[in-house]
Amino acid sequence: MGVGLLVVIGKQGAGKGTQCSRLAERYHVPHVATGDMLRAAVRSGSDLGNRVRSIMDEGHLVPDDLITDVVAARLAEPDAAHGAVLDGYPRTQAQAIALEGIAAPRGIARCILLDVATDVVVRRLSARRVCSNCGWVFSADPPPGPSECTNCGGPVVQRADDTPEAIEERLLAYEQETAPLLEHYREAGILSIVDGDGTLDEVFEKLVAVVDAVHS
Ligand code: AMP
């Protein structure tokens, strides 16, 4: 039956992208990362991309209906029939309600909070660099970090929303809009909290233990 729908929630910079992509690979389901999908739309210059570009650059959330349509369409694709790792959605109460409808009748298998302290994520986000071509993520800590992508050779840049102002805005949106969703998942009995501090491998093993426990 597959792993089902896994929702991973965490502050920006908690390591969601990296860990979700590894989880998706491990459980043979797609990694549905709304931020990545929107950035791809911006790069392609599509209608969607043009609508969301400035909203994203300022660190604000894009409208619920718009992102919900994107997620619903992606989860309706055949490769998501047995599950998906949802990274970056839901982020508001309206999105959480919409997801209940999209996920029915199987529902959400597990919601995992990847928990990292705010000062740690601010440090990580400020040092984050990405390949503007393939999206690989690098760190400029210690400075200066790579200028060329080791995956594709593309230019490595700072994300437009990793400026101090946009980081502050995004963390505020997380506290105000996203963190309150955790209570809903806790009450539903499907919330697990994983400490996101540690090496990539250590954190990944903890995530795998949580997901495996759902199906044992
Ligand atoms: P991320 O890469 O997850 O940090 O997302 C980057 C940006 O994409 C966010 O700051 C928002 O502008 C937008 N975004 C991604 N996912 C959502 C969502 N579920 N709801 C609203 N905006 C989103």
Image (tube, rainbow, N blue to C red):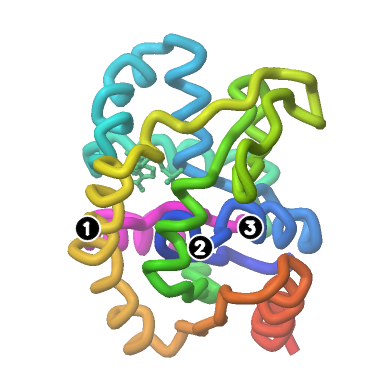
Three-letter amino acid code at the position of disc 1: Leu
Q: Which residue is mark 1?
A: 172
Locate residue 77, reporting x and y percent: 60, 39
Locate residue 7, reporting x and y percent: 50, 65
Q: Earlier in the sequence, mark 2 or mark 1?
A: 2
Tag in front: 1 or 3: 1
Q: Tell me which corner region of the image, top left, top right, bottom left or bottom right, holds residue 178.
A: bottom left
Magenta span of residues: 83-104
Locate residue 50, reporting x and y percent: 32, 15
Tag in front: 2 or 3: 2
Confirm whether residue 102 shows in the render. Answer: yes
Q: Earlier in the sequence, mark 2 or mark 3?
A: 2
Residue drawn at the location 57% of the way across and 59% of the way down: 15
Q: Is residue 106 left or right of residue 27?
A: left
Task: Give the Cα distance between marks 1 and 3.
Answer: 23 Å
Residue drawn at the location 71% of the way across and 62% of the way down: 23
Viewer-proximal residue among 211 and 109: 211
Viewer-proximal residue among 117 and 72: 117
> Ligand 1 sits in which quadrant?
top left
Q: Which residue is mark 2?
A: 14
Dot 3: what SS?
helix
Residue 87 lies in magenta, yes or no? yes
Q: Earlier in the sequence, mark 1 or mark 3?
A: 3
Q: Is residue 20 left or right of residue 65?
A: right
